[in-house]
Amino acid sequence: MNHLRQETILSEAGAACWVIRGAFAHETFDDWHAHIPWQHNTITIYGKKHLEPRLTAWMGPAYAYSRIRWPERELTPLTAGMRDAVQGFCASSPIFNACLFNLYRSGMDSMGWHRDNEPEIDPACIASVSFGATRDFAVRHRHSNKKWMVSLGHGDLLVMEDMQCDFDHALPKRLRVKEPRINLTFRALRG
Ligand SMILES: O=C(O)CCC(=O)C(=O)O
């Protein structure tokens, strides 16, 4: 894997975001799509129920966010293998014991600005792998409003270190994108 190099997206006040292009380009979208137990959750915004603009799945300890409750589900061998490979790129990270999966069916699907700052998530490192369509990933500083945009393609690894306090991130809609994208986000949940 000598040809893989780390590309810094941001490095500010102890926080960092970096990408390794094509780290998992040998994996196929179809294999992951078939492997993951997708579900389509309803969320409540200002008292109104909406279907989330993406499909999701969870493997790891029991976890809840935005009133969605995920029961404990063991990482499958395929997911645990990917976790081990991702962990290999993140030497100083706590051990990832959970994975949130996102399926964006087309550029109409998205994820709004947020932080992964639930108290049980270790903020030191969150790592994600993308498969399928290339999509823009946006980051903004919560106080200065400075913004960064990085395009994530098939097999790219994105790592966020100590970013969940001062930075938000999002996956904006891109109406020209017709193809689906899967994102695997590995987190370390504290027991
Ligand atoms: O799909 C992405 O790259 C973003 C996923 C994300 O922000 C999250 O799962 O918290």
Image (cartoon, rainbow, N blue to C red):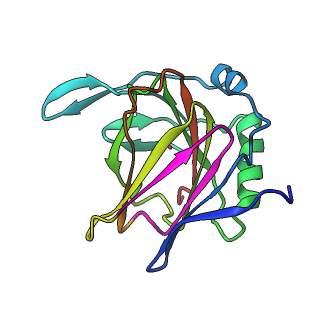
Split into 4 quadrants, where in the image is the C terminus?
bottom right
Split into 4 quadrants, where in the image is the N terminus?
bottom right
User: In the image, is 161 to the left or to the right of 12?
Assistant: right
Residue shown at the point (37%, 34%) measured from the top left: 173
Bounds of the magenta segment: 147-164
Residue shown at the point (40%, 28%) measured from the top left: 109
Q: Image height check: is 53 above or below 97?
A: above
Give the camera-side residue of 37 and 191.
37
The image position of residue 50, as x and y in percent, is: 25, 24
Q: Quadrant of residue 115?
A: bottom left
Q: Is residue 81 magenta?
A: no
The image position of residue 32, as x and y in percent, is: 68, 27
Give the camera-side residue of 185 and 153.
153
Q: Quadrant of residue 134?
A: top right
Give the prevailing secondary structure in the magenta stretch. strand
Q: Image height check: is 168 above or below 37?
A: below
- The extreme front residue here reads 176
User: In the image, is 156 to the left or to the right of 103?
Assistant: right
